[in-house]
Each structure stands twice: as structure tokens, then as C-alpha cells.
Amino acid sequence: RRAKELLAESQAELFKEGLEHNPNIEVGIMVEVPSAVWLAPRLAREVDFFSIGTNDLIQYLLAADRNNPKVAHLYEALHPAVISAIAEVVNVARAADKEVCLCGEMASDPLATLLLVGMGLDELSLSPLFIPVVRKVIREVDYQTARLISRETLQMASVQEIKGYLVERYRDLGLINLVEMYR
């Protein structure tokens, strides 16, 4: 709210000075901590869009610093808590008619692509190196199949179960070679 107040003040100053500016700047939120996931319905009333920052969200959800060798093995993007949190934010955004995008290393993981697309994300922000493979995965599979993969994955209880399922689905779809190229 304070950021929006400061933005309004700046726009008023620009208007008063007769300077050209965009009076309709969209304001969004980075969802990077569990509290933002839990408060997403309230935050949706305050923002124009959501962006999910997976690197920090995973770290804080799983209490696992990926840069700490003692706990880095616990940092796992395909953990059920992580995918459930992402799905929750997407569902809240959809219900509020807000766009939602995802950034971080998870967006660059081809194995996660169909799961993320199936959740209904509007945009993935990823490393340029991974754009060709992620684009190919998206173009090769219809949205209904991605939705089914997402729904089934969200019911699973372990990282091993989720990874095994996704690998099998990619194999069935003839896409496993794309995943293996980048792993």
C-alpha cells in the first residue's frame, strides 16, 4: 500500500509539472515467501498481477538454503509443498482475474514445464539458454494434457512420486530426450 501511495505521489508531481507519464502503471507483487501464498486472496485486492519467485519461495517453504551444503539436498522444486503453493497462487489469481507469472530456476526446468503450464500460469520467465527446449515442450503438448498432468501431480505425496510420474509422462509423449538434454 505504501508503494502505491508513493507511486500516486510521483504521478501527481509529474502531472503538476506537466510532464508526460503513464497514469496507469500496473502494480504487482512478488510471491517469494509462504506468508504471501497464505495471504494471496487479500493481496489480490491490492495488485494488478502476481509473479511467483520460485528460488526464494522454495528455500523458505522447505527451510533449505540451496547454497548451504548441509541442507542443499533438501531444496527441491518438485516438492509437493512447492507445487501446491504455486497452484494456490495461480488459483487465487485466476479467481481474481489477475495475471500470474513464474520466474526462477524452476521456470527453466523442462521437466516442470507441462506441470506449470497445466496449472494455468500466464508466463514463464526463464534463462535464454532454456527457451528453445521449453518452447518445444509447450508446442508439442496440448493444453488439456498439460492440465491433466498438473491435476494428477498435485495429488502426489512425494518428490520421488512426482518425478517418476513426470518422467513417465514425458516418455509417453516422446519428449523425454528434451528433458535429458538439460539434466
Image (cartoon, rainbow, N blue to C red):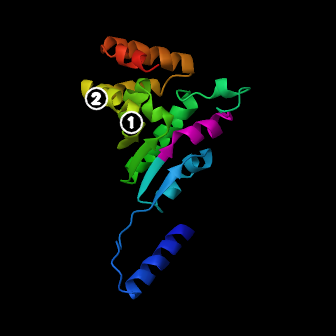
- Ranked by sequence position, the earlier of labels 2 and 1 is 1
Q: Position of residue 52 (x, y in %)?
A: 49, 45
Q: Position of residue 18 (x, y in %)?
A: 35, 86
- How packed mark 2 is, by other alpha carbons closer than 10 Å (few <14, some 14-19, many 20 or more), is few
The quadrant of the image that shows the N terminus is bottom right
In magenta stretch: residue 2: no
For the record, the magenta segment spans 52-65
Which of the labelled discs sits on residue 128, or is there none? 1
Instruction: Please name the residue that numbered disc 2 is placed on.
Output: 144
Residue at the image point whose x is 52% and y is 16% from the top: 161
The secondary structure type at the circle numbered 1 is helix
- How packed mark 1 is, by other alpha carbons closer than 10 Å (few <14, some 14-19, many 20 or more), is few
Q: CA distance from mark 2 to mark 1?
A: 27 Å
Q: Main secondary structure of the magenta part?
A: helix
Q: Position of residue 100 (x, y in %)?
A: 40, 47
Residue at the image point whose x is 40% and y is 25% from the top: 110
Q: Position of residue 75 (x, y in %)?
A: 62, 29
Compared to residue 59, the image places residue 1 above or below, namely below
Compared to residue 168, the image places residue 89 above or below, namely below
Is residue 41 left or right of 120 when viewed as pictured?
right
The residue under label 2 is which amino acid type? Gln
Which numbered disc, 2 or 1, marks the residue closer to the eye?
A: 1
The secondary structure type at the circle numbered 2 is helix
The residue under label 1 is which amino acid type? Pro
Of residues 100 and 71, the one drawn nearer to the viewer in this rendering? 71
Contact (Cβ within 8 Å) of mark 2 with mark 1:
no
